[in-house]
Image: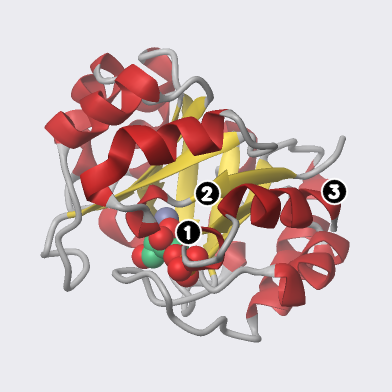
Amino acid sequence: MSHKIAPSILAADFGNLQRDCEMVNNSQADWFHIDVMDGVFVPNISYGMPVISAINKHAEKTLDVHLMIVDPDRYIKTFKEIGADVLTVHYEACTHLHRTLQAIKNEGMKAGVALNPHTSVHLLSDVLKDLDLVCIMSVNPGFGGQSFIENTYNKVKQLSILRKESGANFLIEIDGGVGTANARKLLDAGADVLVAGSFVFKSDNPTQTIADLKAV
Ligand code: DX5
Ligand code: ZN
């Protein structure tokens, strides 16, 4: 299976959201990556339900929603209603992660968990088979356009080993500072989904940049 590319809408032009959604529809991208920040779990606020509903009206591909919010259980049903296909919560924001993952799956969505740069992949060993996706944060969450943290390669390799040993089959997603300079090394380490915000939307030709990431 070839790797997936998930452009991060956080870096899109919010004044031209329909245009940017259509660009993603007509590109080789696989998913829309949608970052939700609450100003509590992370020191920034992005956008919420009305904007995601608007994106969902135009988006023709999988909506991969990354929740950087505390107590995400409150909104699982709502995210399903507004179009989320994959719903990812943060390990650091969930006291009862196992319950949260089941609640996401009970709503008919794929369940993901994201790990901050300091959080060991080994902390997931008791839920590996409950996961559809693990998002390894390669920057500290909260902002687009940050530099990639090099230790990510080790984490991806370790998680890939855990996946193999356990027979689990979640996807490994990398989020933050991803571009053509590090994509090949990430894929070789075991990544399946590459999120890219600034690298795509700040480029001269986003459609071509997505194709370049897909061709890595
Ligand atoms: C960071 C977000 C990322 C962000 C990636 O908190 O989770 O998805 O949009 O942006 P770039 O690719 O610019 O680092
Ligand atoms: Zn994200």
Residue 89 lies, in percent from the top left, at: 36, 46
Q: Which residue is mark 2?
A: 7
Who comes first in sequence, dot 1 or dot 2? Answer: 2
**Dot 2 surroundings within 10 Å: few (below 14), some, or many (20 or more)?**
many
* Left or right side of 133 for 66: left
Q: Secondary structure at mark 2?
A: strand
On screen, residue 76 above or below 41: above
User: Residue 41 shows which numbered tag?
Assistant: none
Q: Which residue is mark 1?
A: 201
Query: At x 53% / y 24%, what residue is drawn?
Result: 61
Q: Secondary structure at mark 3?
A: helix
Q: Which residue is mark 3?
A: 164
Residue 95 lies, in percent from the top left, at: 27, 51
Mark 1 to mark 2: distance in Å? 8 Å
Q: Amino acid at mark 2?
A: Pro
Who comes first in sequence, dot 1 or dot 3? Answer: 3
Residue 5 lies, in percent from the top left, at: 65, 46
**Ligand 2 quadrant assignment:** bottom left
Q: Say if mark 1 contacts mark 2, CB within 8 Å.
A: yes
Q: Quadrant of the C terminus?
A: bottom right
Query: At x 30% / y 39%, what residue is drawn?
Result: 17
Query: At x 11% / y 64%, what residue is drawn?
Result: 39
Q: Is mark 3 within 8 Å of ligand 2?
A: no
Who comes first in sequence, dot 2 or dot 3? Answer: 2
Mark 1 to mark 3: distance in Å? 34 Å
On screen, residue 139 above or below 147: above
**Dot 3 surroundings within 10 Å: few (below 14), some, or many (20 or more)?**
few
Q: Amino acid at mark 1?
A: Phe
Task: Select label 2 or label 3 by which is in front.
Answer: 2
